[in-house]
Image (spheres, helix red, strand yellow):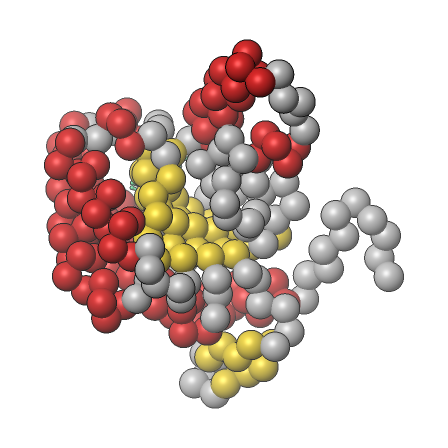
Amino acid sequence: MKIFKKTDGESNVINGLPRHIAIILDGNGRWAQKKGMPRTAGHSYGAENFRTISKYCKEIGIKYLTVYAFSTENWKRPKAEVDAIMNLLEKYLLEAIEKMENDRIKLKFLGDMSVLSPKLQKMISEVEEISSRYDGVQANICLNYGSRDEIVKAAIRYAEDYKATGKALNEEEFSRYLYSCDIPDPDLVIRPSGEYRLSNFLMWQSAYSELYFTEVLWPDFTPEELDKALESYSHRKRLYGGLRK
Ligand code: IPE
Ligand code: IPE
Ligand code: MG
């Protein structure tokens, strides 16, 4: 049994908090445009909100938080927006290095980092290394991530191993080739911003995840909004193909 804060500020005891929450960080652009700001300002507020929500997850005892920050398809956007997101990432990583001692959040990055600038790649390795000693919440940031890309890359790596060892393949074995190899499947996948799709996010891992959609845009997704998702999750019956007891 864990405790999380209710919107009225009281505490509430809830059975069955998810061990792993995954969130599609969507709606930054629309949030900024509604306020008459450039889309990039939305990404900046979105990054700050990720910090708020990861701290909240740590506070309430969530073990894993995985967020979708940049997809393999997001490169299609205007160069100016992509550049602004990469600059923001650099700023975020610098701050993460500075604040890590205080936050004590373990950060991991999932996706194909090889196309990022050498500077960003180096900072990512540094952040992962320094934070690997923290054992609170593990926050996984999906960057240049796409499920199809992840699955294809896993298949290629398995094929190489197969040539060398001939080892048999099953679901569990295949999972070990994914970026998420040492992370349990998400219990709850949240998509803010009123879009009802996965957009190439954790398609293998979310086979039996509970889904939660809200119209709220990511920068407005406060801990109280997360509480609503957790409240909804606490009433779900997960059957995995079996029968209701
Ligand atoms: C999500 O917000 C962040 C990224 C995809 C990088 P969007 O930029 O997609 O925001 P909307 O959906 O246009 O509002
Ligand atoms: C999904 O959002 C990707 C991230 C939040 C990083 P998008 O805004 O890219 O998804 P679509 O294009 O609406 O499906
Ligand atoms: Mg979007």
Q: In which quarter of the image is the N terminus?
A: bottom right
Viewer-proximal residue among 11 and 195: 11
Specify whether residue 132 is in view.
Answer: yes
Give x and y (percent) for residue 148.
48, 26
Which image quadrant is residue 45 in? bottom left
Give x and y (percent) for residue 234.
63, 67
Residue 133's place in the image compared with 185, above or below, is below
Q: Which residue is drawn at 13% across and 36% down?
A: 119
Q: Residue at x 49, y 33 (%)?
A: 178
Residue furthest top as drawn: 163
Residue 76's place in the image compared with 110, above or below, is above
Q: From the viewer's perspective, is 213 left or right of 142?
A: right
Give x and y (percent) for residue 57.
42, 67
Viewer-proximal residue among 112 and 77: 112
Residue furthest front as drawn: 165
Residue 231's place in the image compared with 145, above or below, is below
Q: From the viewer's perspective, is 152 left or right of 72?
A: right
Q: Which residue is drawn at 33% across and 55% down?
A: 132
Specify whether residue 214 is in view.
Answer: no
The number of callouts visible is: 0
Q: From the viewer's perspective, is 81 left or right of 50?
A: left
Residue 233's place in the image compared with 91, above or below, is below
Give x and y (percent) for residue 43.
23, 48
Q: In which quarter of the image is the C terminus?
A: bottom right
Q: From the viewer's perspective, is 25 left or right of 20?
A: left
Which image quadrant is residue 223 in? bottom left
